[in-house]
Amino acid sequence: MDEIRDLVAAHLPGYVPRTVVLLGEGADNVAYEVNDELVVRLVRRAEDAAEVAREARLLTAVAGVSPLPVPVPAFAVPELGCLAYVKLRGRPLLELSPSWRSAHRESVGAMVGELLAALHTTGTERLAAVAVPDDSPPEEWLAEAGDHYEAVSARVPEIHRAAIEAFVATAPPSGGYPLVFSHNDLGIEHLLVDPVHGTVTGVIDWGDAAFVDPAYDFGLLYRDLGPVALDAALCRYHADDAALRQRAVFYARCSVIEDLAYGLETDDLRYVDKSLAALDWLFR
């Protein structure tokens, strides 16, 4: 904890780091919360330190185009793999109850649609210098979904197994889309919301942001919040594109199997429960 205090004091003159608590640990980063208002994140691997400067530039650029709040860098120390930013208010949508998510899925979907419209137009123009393409072929997505299904099939309700097995054996949708800048991991764990008013108060974890298929983040929204949210998002996105919707459904089906595998592997029931619930609208 003293290391974090020293970092903050050295890079924010006049700021007094009174409290430092461990916020979370992941495979790539360790995050601390300072004074309940600042997040200080350190990379675990030395080889990832070089990405800190790029991510700080990316977050600054995203803040200039996003209609929703995003983490704004307070300081970065690339040689130490350290990035600090002001904490956003709200709770991760993943932490709220399924009934709360169901009640607010349309309004959340609409706000996500506005976000994606901005990222896929203005963001694509401004972020070419700090983001790279991430466009795995659909065949690779489908092969990975098949592998994940083999690992989790015993936990999948029997009513859904035939549909999933037919999906992983079917040809994927065709490509031919322009790449756009997007969050590239827009699951409900990365959406912060106001539990009282139901508004989206922030979008976090931009580490995977890249130039991708515009359908991908729509697919994650559909996976986590269902068809009502997808319809609301596409309406605000001003798109009635059958091919985009088809690819969104494809990504939703692939990623829900991956999320289920992740939840089972890590014993995180939040991912297990939301994935099993989503099978009802993804594999009827």
Image (cartoon, rainbow, N blue to C red):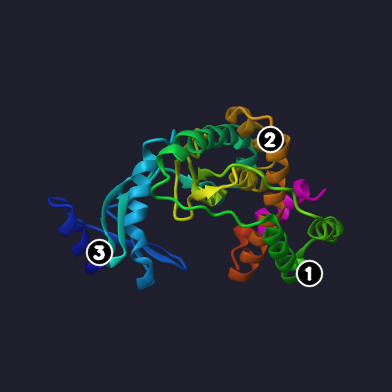
Quadrant containing the N terminus in the rendered view: bottom left
Q: Which residues are magenta?
A: 272-284
- Classify residue 215 by image quadrant: top right
Q: Disc 3 versus disc 2: distance between alpha carbons?
A: 43 Å
Residue closest to the eye, 211 or 279: 211
Residue for point 62% across, 58% down: 271
Q: Disc 1 versus disc 2: distance between alpha carbons?
A: 29 Å
CB-based contact (under 8 Å), mark 1 and mark 2: no
Residue identified by numbered label 1: 154
**Is tag 1's residue or tag 3's residue first in the polypeptide sequence?**
3
Q: Disc 1 versus disc 3: distance between alpha carbons?
A: 44 Å
Question: In the rendered structure, which amino acid carries the disc numbered 2?
Answer: Val
Q: Residue 16: image x %, image y %?
A: 17, 54
The answer to whether residue 275 is magenta is: yes
Residue for point 44% across, 33% down: 67
Question: In the rendered structure, which amino acid carries the disc numbered 3?
Answer: Ile
Q: Residue furthest front?
A: 176
